[in-house]
Amino acid sequence: MRIHIENIGCFKNLVDSERLYHALEVAGFSVTFGSFVQDADIAIINTCGFIGDAEEDSEALIKQYEKRKKKGQISQLWVMGCYGQKYGESLKHRNPTIDRIFGNFDWKNILHILGCDFYAGIQRHVTTPPHYAYLKISEGCNRPCAYCIKPILNGKLASVSMETILEEVRWMVSQGVRELQIVAQNLTDYGLDIYGENKIAELVDRIANVPGVDWIRLHYAYPLGFPKDLLKVIREHDNVCNYLDMALQHCNTEMLKRMRRGGSKEYITDLLAEIRESVPGIYLRTTMLTGFPGETVDMFDELCEFVKEQKFERMGVFRYSAQKGSYSAKHYTDDIPDDEKTRRALYLMDIQNQYYRRLHLSLLETVHRVIVDECVDGKYYCRTEHSTPMADPKVIVESDKSLSIGSFYQVQFTEVLGKDIVGKVI
């Protein structure tokens, strides 16, 4: 039987798809992954339904597979993941060609239906370039953010034990993985549920001591209750990248209260200052949310000034979308027009793009260690420790000598090219 898997959404989703991929291979199925390229008996889509844009992307992908089913390119269409969890069997009313719907993490049922045992091991079929992989250390979240339905979809915080994580790290290193992207819905709270206290600093310290781990990058910290002992670990380990992904969403204290994020502008400002002081040269990545109910023009202007002052090295911006079941959808009126939400998001991102250019211009002629991700049309696309795959600026290198994918090189920056930067190997 031929099974095709296509993943959409966050990198935590990708880890789930990779586990399913491996489990199906172990069971003896012929499995393909990614963009659809050949006929299959079953197509499984791992969907995302976190925000409105993600729902639209999931729905569009389902429609594509419905057309393939009508053409006879696939026999059955199965849907799993957040979008399936969110709407369940009601999805079939909108998409009657869907044969089966599964929620989050429902691999056991998928494998059971296919006549094989559930696979619960640490191994998976890594679909990223072989030198890096995503490492999911927990699932779910206990935080009450007003706009978020992740706790509803994914449940409460469920940390993976340190022993299991370290076993997975050692296995990935044995497979040639050199760079780990640690991901969690909220890595700030890692360990609270199983150890009774925050253990992220200890976990990262132990991972950093595994031979063969060259880079570790941290994604999705929560500002309130941020563990300061993690900063010491980042500072003292050369293989823990000077990079921290921490979504702030806003700076206005009233907005933070309405979002049920906790804290205040003063708290966030002090925390950012302490992080930068404790880890000199760290790159901070954050996300901001525009158009949340009640966001006045003055509040948005305050956010713009905050972004200008903080000079985040990396930033993304999202428009607010009311999600069914969320606190904000139940208690607030979505009072800001979509075009105004978009205008604010674009304006804020324009501020960030201007800073990207100033930052990159200041780096010209300096030399940095980069890892090579891929070669396209004779150009090598690389990253410094300050960039995560997919989302962040890249370093583009043209070289007379052949460079090895997954290897490190010293590169001198020579030119700014939009969001990215051009360099030459030293």
Image (tube, grey):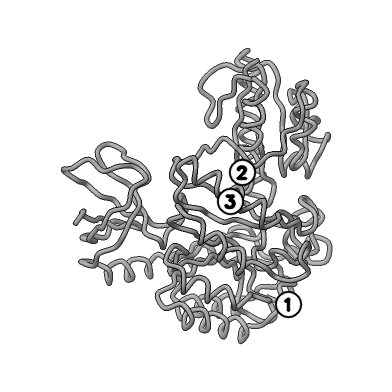
Could you give the CA–CA distance between mark 1 and mark 3, rounded to whole angstroms?
A: 32 Å
Callout 3 touching callout 2 (CB < 8 Å): yes
Work out which residue is located at the far top of the displayed protein and give it. Answer: 72
Query: Left of 338 or right of it: where is 116?
Result: right
- Name the residue at 26% across, 43% down: 403
Disc 2 marks which amino acid?
Val
Which residue bears the numbered disc 1? 257
- In the image, 208 versus 382, the foreground residue is 208
Callout 2: few (<14), some (14-19), or many (20+) C-alpha neighbours within 10 Å? many
Disc 1 marks which amino acid?
Lys
In front of the other: label 1 or label 3?
Answer: 3
Which residue bears the numbered disc 2? 15
Disc 3 marks which amino acid?
Leu
SS for callout 2: helix
In front of the other: label 3 or label 2?
Answer: 3
Callout 1 touching callout 3 (CB < 8 Å): no
Callout 2 touching callout 1 (CB < 8 Å): no
Q: Where is residue 393 in the image (x, y as percent from the top left)?
A: 39, 57
Task: Answer with mark 3 or mark 2, whichever residue precedes in sequence.
Answer: 2
In front of the other: label 2 or label 1?
Answer: 2
SS for callout 1: helix
